[in-house]
Amino acid sequence: MALSFLSRKARVTTITIEEDAIRHVEIKSTSPLHVSCAEEQVLPEGIIKDGKIVDIDTLVSILDKAVNQWGLSKKSVRFLAPDEYVIIRKLTYPPDVRRDELKGHFFIEIGSTLYLPFDDPVFDVVPYTASTENKEAILIASKESILNTYEDVFEDVKLKPIVADIGPLALYRLAYQQHNFTGEEHILLLDIKNDNYTVSIFHHHFPLFMRPIEVEAPDNSNFFSDSVSSKMESIISELEKLMNFYRYNMNQGNEGITHLLLNGEFDDFEQLMKLFSSRFEVKTSTVVRETIYLEDGKAIPVRFNRALGLALKEV
């Protein structure tokens, strides 16, 4: 499979496999956004854990039924690499390295001067176009053996996996379609998924940073504790740390986050948005500003946002 996180590929169908469900969407047009289908098959707990497929046989069985039901057999497919096995880094490279030599350059660097958290990385790299004195590139990497298990599952149900993408890029495509960003913004995107919290940062339409954040569990031993508020305070504390890291470590104090986008489902969602607006001096919004509807008038739930953004890759 040719992995290319940042380039366009031929038109294929869109399927995401995540811990809670398999989702399939099709988009006909973007202006206006015309979604022809958004369907899902819920997965029992324990089939996928922390991005790793634990029960391959059961997943194949469920996916096979869904593929036949949705009429997708023998189609090419794009999917998302699990967040737990994705890293994004902005790196400098020597001025004598040409753009078409970037991948070869970093292939040599990995393991010698550049260390990644897995020993079998597959990666894509592109030049970063922001104005800077040093030449910089964005490297996006995942773990090949993990991606291979997802690839095998698709092939077992007679699908052809040809494109692996990442969740932050998918969500940014959807956000760009909704907000029409210019690229001058410094955007922090918080994705809440199955009690997992992932933060990514974008500037000039490039992903510059991605990492999970640890949110403290509520202290249920205290009868008088406000569990929702304690979780919110934990999220806000982690975001403040990352905003300071971005401003002072990545930008030497010159530039900071200007926009905060939230994606996902959360108890007291409106209260969380109000807290963000009051605590951070940035523009705060959701990835999808207005509900997206299917042709039959049914609203598409927020949990489809990652799949919708992935489908926008080809439209």
Image (cartoon, helix red, strand yellow):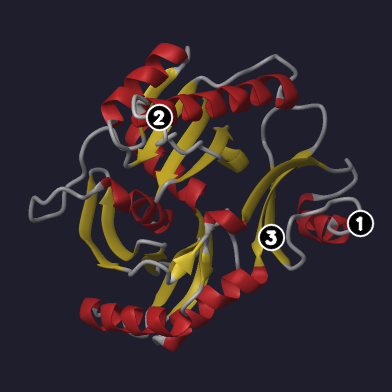
Describe the element under mark 3 as helix, strand or loop. strand
**Is residue 248 toward the left or the right of residue 285 in the image?**
right
Q: Residue furthest left?
A: 296
Q: Please name the residue shown 28% across and 57% down the image.
A: 27
Which is more N-terminal, label 2 or label 3? 3
Which is more N-terminal, label 1 or label 2? 1
Q: Please name the residue shown 82% across and 53% down the image.
A: 115
Describe the element under mark 2 as helix, strand or loop. loop
Q: Please name the residue shown 42% across and 35% down the image.
A: 221
How far apart in space, not on screen, are marks 3 and 2 (Cα)? 46 Å
Which quadrant of the structure image shows residue 12?
bottom left
Q: Residue 240, relative to residue 53: is it above or below?
A: above
Question: Can the viewer see residue 249 in this picture?
Answer: yes
The residue lying toward the viewer, choosing from 7 and 281, is 281
Residue 132 location (% of width, % of height) = 76, 27
Q: Amino acid at mark 1?
A: Ser
Q: Residue 160, relative to residue 48: is it above or below?
A: below
Residue 113 location (% of width, % of height) = 90, 51
**Is residue 266 toward the left or the right of residue 242 in the image?**
left
Which disc number belongs to residue 112? Answer: 1
The residue that label 3 is drawn on is: 123
Residue 171 location (% of width, % of height) = 43, 45
Residue 190 location (% of width, % of height) = 46, 36
Q: Amino acid at mark 3?
A: Phe
Disc 3 and disc 1 in contact, CB within 8 angstroms: no
